[in-house]
Image: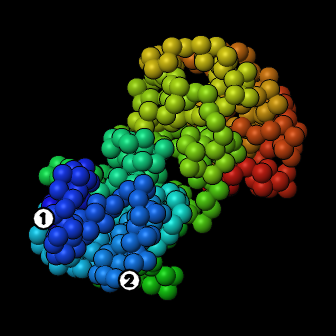
Amino acid sequence: MLNDFATLDKVDINKIEHIAEKEPELFERNAILRHDFMQLRIIGCLDSEEHYEDLYHWSCLTEDPQLQQLASLVLSHNFVKKSGLLTQAGDILDKIRALLKLHKSSSNKKNYGKEDFHTEFKTSIIYPENSMRVDVQAQTIKIMQEICAFLNAEGGHLYLGVSDIGYEMGLEEDLKNPLFKGSRDKYEVYVNNQIIYYLGQEAAHYIHTHFDTDISNAVLIIDIEPCPTPKAVGNVYYERMGTSARKVNDTYKDKFLAIRKQWAEEHIPHAVVTQEETQTAVENTPATKEPKNSNKHVESAPITDHIQTSRLRNNALHDYEEGYRPITAVICLMDTDEYKILAEDDWQDYRLKLAVHEDEEAGWLILVYESGKVCKVSMAELLQRERGRVFKRYAGEKLIFASVASDKDSVCVGFIDGKSNHYVRFDDVDRFEHGKMQAEGTLPMDVPNAGVHYVEVIAQDQVPVNRNIGRRTIGCILKTVEGRRCMEVLPDCNLK
């Protein structure tokens, strides 16, 4: 049975109790057998919450220091593992093996080697290292930084569910989290969605995830190829240094970008990476310094551009996101000019997923197309659709924006004139006609223009200039005093 523990990290507690009931006098007569049997009883309490009192009692017995130490270690292991400190729990398990004179080599736990320039081990995506508190966002960002460093170096492999010393630990505690509901598929989809969100679609093409099929435990392997374009998490670059990710500081950044450009030219001759393109890529990734906006990101599909949604509205889909409110439905806009309504997130990739809250069910879905045409659809009618069934929407023009709104909101559309001047105008939601999902929508004005540079939905009482200015004017030009007041209340709105 000790061999069972050496290979499986556990023993059959029922078998131990059966032996104790069948031949109790055997252990009474033989002190060595009694000692060994007590060892089995103690390690049989691993990962069991029912034996805390027994373990505490045994840890206080001074007659046998070895058994006393073993009980203390098992008790510590159970407390530490329950608190989410998986690496520390693994270390205590190693100490238990050492105390029992069982070698790691006798364990059938898979060993993935050791961390190096191309290899990184992480035990969890929900527990930050050396922390007893669940913090999915903080640990996710940490893992994205490690992946970013591999992209900016020679590539490598990141293993989720592996201890610092390279042994499989599995993702059992992660999968118990309500975010994943025990599903490996949901876990893998979550990781890939975060890769797209934090590192962008280009980076996602150089990253591949899969669970290790050689073991029963859940270990997610993330294979990363070097990316020709330097990548950043937020506005910060990371590179692989030794066995960890290091932040690229401002004094070294120019040299770092030059090195990556040279690497791309040598290894991928057709790739021309300019500093301007790199800076654009950085600006288009979410800033980790502002976690309060993390609940508004767009989970975009890898094969197409995402659809922008309101930066001001709460679009948190999951309870781990800041500002989350219970949702009654999810509107999924697909990359095939189709859509569907779900009762809850299905963890698949779409061009946009919109969380619907109970107080929004009487509102409107605002759709804005590339030309600036606005379509207003009744949420009440939309939510009567059969859940999960795919429906058609207007396909005559590219959809660039979608958001839930109420009659107390205004739709802001920013147009560009023939001289490249940028404008914004605000038209109340109730000014637009009630349409259907297959309707093309209507322009809010009749003035010729050169395109749309910005769209947002904003509360009417937050609009700093006149609303509903009529169809014969293009709007408020941004380079004026009034324009600057508009930019102050419109996230990401600027003169460029």
- Is there any visible trace of residue 86 in the rendered image? yes
Real-space Cα separation, disc 1 to disc 2, in angstroms:
27 Å
| Residue 48 left/right relative to 37 | right
Q: Position of residue 273 (x, y in %)?
A: 35, 65
Identify the residue at image location x=46%, y=73%: 130
Q: Quadrant of residue 369?
A: top right
Q: Secondary structure at mark 1?
A: helix
How packed mark 1 is, by other alpha carbons closer than 10 Å (few <14, some 14-19, many 20 or more), is: few
Locate residue 390, reporting x and y percent.
44, 18
Residue 126: image tag: none
Q: Residue at horizontal 41%, vertical 64%? A: 54
Q: Is residue 461 left or right of residue 277?
A: right
First along the sequence among labels 1 and 2: 1
Quarter of the image that includes the N terminus: bottom left
Q: Which mark is residue 62?
A: 2
Kindly identify the amino acid type of the residue bearing the numbered disc 1. Answer: Asn
Number of marks in picture = 2
Q: Nearer the viewer, residue 244 or 125?
A: 125
- Give the image location of residue 136, x and y in percent: 50, 57
Q: Which residue was labeled with disc 1?
A: 3
Mark 2 residue element: loop
- Given the image, on which type of amino acid does mark 2 rest? Thr
